[in-house]
Amino acid sequence: MTKRSSVAYLFVAPAVTFFLLFTVAPTFMVGYLSFFKTNYVVSRFVGFSNYARLLQDRAFIQSIGNSLLFALFGLPMRLLLPLWMALRAYAYSERMRNMMRFGFYIPALTSPLVLASVWLFIFDYRRGIVSWLIGLIGLKPVVWFGSQLPAIFAMTLLLSVGGIGAAFLLFTAVLQSVPRTTIDAAWIDGASWWQIRWRVLFPIILPWVLFMTLYLLIASFQIIEIIWRMTSGGPYNSTATMLYNIYETGFVRSAYGMASAKSLVMMLVLLGIAVVKHRLEGGEDRFI
Amino acid sequence: MKYVFLLFCLLLLFPLYWMISLSFQDVRGVLHLPPNIVPKRVTLINYERIAADSRLLRWAANSIIVTTGALAISLSSTVMAAWAFAVYRFRGRQLIYWAFIASLMIPAYSLMISRFVLVRYMGMINTWWPLMMMGACSPVAIILFIKYFKKIPEALADSARIDGLSELGILFRIILPQCMPLIGYTIITTYIGMFAEFIWPLLLLMDRRKWTLCLGVTKFITEYYSRYGKAGADVLVGISQAGGTLLFLPPLIIFIAFRKTFRKQFLAGGVKE
């Protein structure tokens, strides 16, 4: 049913207004602002000089590597583990699967910021339960938030608490939509469960695995809350993601021009990834 | 293997449990090694400390106001736009639709700086308006509603039109009552998402009295150490667990209140249509 009616303009007007105000205008403003140098009060047109200085910004360059580390650490925890579990759970009873889904739902519902407090205590060097457990087996405890890799590892674990559940829910949902007849046909042809899992189900789920990989990559550049709460990007910017670096530039040092230039770089990099991800989702026929 | 998986579920729930259990213990209980998995003595001292020193109720009320406002604005604009796309043909329809889809590919936080500058330019810093309006146009939600509307029989709207109901009346009195499951789902996800929102309140709200619950409690914890120094460090452990537990309450309450909707959602395979 399609009607020509001017009342339609009235209906789309609020959404379009908000869209212009908070998405379209800021998108153009990022580019515009990046040509200015801002010092608390004055702002002066400087052309491309922000971009030239950006290439020498050690902290910014380093933030790319840090973000990639978050993605790299996240991959086995937040992607491969739930994938493997979902493939195994396919053979389980309905009841069992629902119990697992329920068990994963509450952690997936909890924002990482909520758990940040208990996480800092669990990984506390002196009083934490992890240090205590490591001490029990006679090893020296690790200063978790004192250097880059342990800190990023601990924070990735925190993100995984919810992330594992979310990915598991997605993967089981995709597997549930595989028609029963496909599996039955494989059975009749004499395939074992192992073969069904890796030769039939895995190819079906593969686009979603790629989709989640790209999602993880995009999200890793934009981790900010837990870094703000747990390390403030330290020690020496070694745990600052790209977004945290932008936040620091813009809001701690008030260099909006520079921060905009960095934002534009981030936008262009992630946009490339997002276009591929969008294709994998099936264009606008997306189902999540 | 099954039981290993169930144990793994429990392991993921452990930090949450432990946070709650620590929040009900005093300093000695919290720092006790080996750790008390079940609290030996239950006390409310951590919650009392937070309540005495902060504006907890005020922040909670603020959160409810901001979230409800955001929900009212976003739900009404989403529903109307989706209805227009589903039913009418108008000039610019394709263009707007493609702009919505294209905007999904822009990483959300790359607009953090420019949105902030824009909001400051409009003089809306330190108000709740930008928080309520920023998420008002959600292309994902609009697409969800378009798909839902297309499944509703056309005759329903047509017969109402013949009976002389206005176009707005058709949407709000005839169509929307058919969409309650999707509306319920949208309300739940918006509430949970907005309560957890931290960065935007942090950037926009300077006035303590306007803080939301998530911002207020988090800032209270991070400022506690600088206020009381080393002497406060041990006390802070219990207090931050109590703060975390307070922040866990809103999603938990929503989960319990709407458990039927959640149940339907994950029995349906979690595929949101």
Image: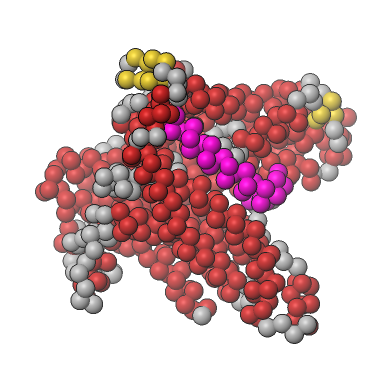
Q: How many marks?
A: 0
Is A176 located above or below residue B192 in the figure? below
Instruction: Pick whichever, B84 or B248, lies toward us.
Output: B84
Please, which colouring scheme is shown?
secondary structure
Q: Residue at x 49, y 74 (%)?
A: B5
Q: In the picture, residue A155 is in which quadrant?
A: bottom left
* Left or right of residue A61: residue B270: right
Q: Is residue A262 left or right of residue A87?
A: left
- Please say if A22 is above or below A267: above
| Residue B109: % across, % down | 48, 37
Above or below, A275 against A79 in this view is above
Name the magenta segment's main secondary structure.
helix
Residue B23, placed above or below residue B212: below
The image quarter containing residue A225 is top left
> Along the horizontal axis of the image, is B98 left or right of B58?
right
Percent of width and height locating residue A108? 48, 57
Residue shown at the point (74%, 75%) measured from the top left: A183
Q: Nearer the viewer, residue B219 or A188?
A: A188
Which residue is rendered at x = 45% and y = 43% of the image? A222
- Where does the image place residue B219, in percent across and percent down from the top left? 29, 40
Task: Mark yes or no: residue A79 visible.
Answer: yes
* Quadrant assignment, res B87: top right
Is A195 or B6 nearer to us in this picture? A195
Magenta region, residue range: A261-288
Residue A144: x percent and y percent? 26, 58
At 55% from the left and 63% from the top, the residue drawn is A168
Residue at the bottom extreme, as displayed = A190
Q: Which quadrant is home to the N terminus of chain A?
A: top right
Q: Is residue B253 left or right of residue A127?
A: right
Q: Is B124 included in the stretch rendered in magenta?
A: no
Please indicate, yes or no, whether residue B209 appears anywhere in the rendered image.
no
Residue A275 counted in the magenta span: yes
